[in-house]
């Protein structure tokens, strides 16, 4: 009986001592969270997509609270409206940012970029890219295996069966950048959405010289520089045999589109072009 009693007393005393130790340890290492973090997190859409560059909405909220200014802070899914709410919760100002959208810079459909080999492996762009250049003669183009589709949490991108290329749903895309990071070929980029969602861009990232690039894909950029000469705003540069349009400088005049001999420059959401009217020469007839 004495043994049982002594054991109970010993265990009870040990429990009290450990409880006291745990209490002091908890007080020593406790983290006091700023209540504004909850306020900011409540303003966010809760997508946890990582488009802001932080680990989820909570991480972004903590970063906003700790920051002296909201410059450089942006929530892609929420946009300017959400950032205004965040700024209001923190008593700061948030500068507006142009809405952006993911753009697929490859126009090499099955018809334009013919297959020369057969890929028989896991349905993953990352795996395919690590093994070889692709199943066409263009080592730069889209592999079409859908890694970008898998990572998109907004159902904003899908692979078109006819062309084999990713298609971005403008209504659902939040410019979170997940597809940009997932693409091993770096053919997806974020560009300004543009007024009335109109955009002009070079849909090619092939850096081969003109002849090899054209052989590999009918719509490849051949670095002919015609677009550069046609642009009145110095918005186009040709670097390493491939043209690129700076969306900050581009005024959407579309002159470059008409000059491109391969159709590598795409124009989206513009009204149909007016048919060119040929001027008829008239001769004066004497009465």
Image (tube, rainbow, N blue to C red):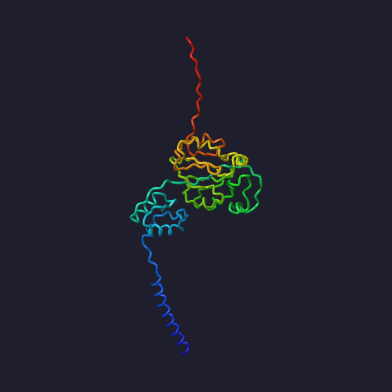
Residue 142, position as x, y percentages in the image: 58, 47
Which residue is rendered at x = 50% and y = 26% of the image? 277
Residue 155, position as x, y percentages in the image: 51, 50
Q: As displayed, is residue 35 above or below residue 247?
A: below
Which residue is rendered at x = 41% and y = 74% of the image? 25
Image quadrant of residue 60? bottom left
Q: With 61 as the anchor, is 279 left or right in this view?
A: right
Which residue is rendered at x = 54% and y = 49% of the image? 186
Residue 259, position as x, y percentages in the image: 53, 34
Q: In this view, which residue lies farthest toward the left? A: 91
* Depth order, front residue of 66/232: 232
- Asked whether the viewer can see residue 162, the reply is no
Q: With 52 as the anchor, is 203 left or right in this view?
A: right
Q: As displayed, is residue 128 above or below residue 285?
A: below
Number of numbered discs: 0
Residue 143, position as x, y percentages in the image: 59, 48
Q: With 205 as the anchor, is 57 left or right in this view?
A: left
* Depth order, front residue of 102/248: 248
Q: In this view, which residue lies farthest toward the bottom? A: 2
- Asked whether the viewer can see residue 50, the reply is yes
* Depth order, front residue of 133/1: 133
Q: As displayed, is residue 55 above or below residue 195?
A: below
């Amino acid at each position: 009986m004495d043994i049982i009693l002594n054991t109970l007393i010993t265990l009870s005393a040990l429990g009290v001592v450990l409880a006291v130790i745990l209490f002091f340890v908890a007080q020593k290492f406790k983290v006091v969270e700023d209540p504004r973090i909850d306020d900011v997190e409540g303003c966010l859409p809760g997508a946890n997509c990582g488009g802001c560059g932080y680990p989820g909405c909570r991480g972004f909220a903590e970063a906003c609270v700790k920051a002296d200014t909201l410059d450089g802070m942006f929530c892609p899914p929420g946009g300017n409206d959400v950032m205004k709410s965040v700024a209001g919760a923190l008593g700061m100002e948030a500068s507006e940012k142009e809405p952006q959208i993911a753009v697929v810079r490859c126009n090499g459909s099955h018809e334009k970029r013919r297959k020369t080999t057969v890929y028989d492996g896991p349905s993953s762009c990352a795996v395919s890219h690590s093994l070889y250049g692709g199943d066409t003669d263009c080592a730069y183009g889209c592999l079409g295996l859908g890694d970008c589709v898998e990572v998109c949490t907004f159902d904003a991108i899908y692979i078109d069966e006819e062309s084999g290329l990713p298609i971005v749903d403008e209504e659902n895309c939040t410019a979170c950048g997940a597809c940009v990071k997932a693409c091993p070929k770096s053919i997806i980029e974020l560009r300004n959405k543009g007024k009335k969602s109109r955009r002009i861009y070079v849909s090619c990232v092939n850096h081969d010289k003109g002849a090899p690039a054209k052989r590999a894909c009918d719509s490849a950029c051949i670095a002919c520089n015609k677009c550069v000469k046609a642009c009145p705003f110095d918005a186009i540069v040709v670097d390493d045999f491939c043209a690129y349009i700076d969306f900050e400088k581009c005024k959407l005049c579309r002159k470059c589109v008409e000059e491109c001999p391969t159709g590598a420059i795409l124009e989206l959401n513009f009204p149909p072009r007016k048919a060119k009217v040929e001027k008829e020469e008239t001769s004066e007839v004497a009465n």
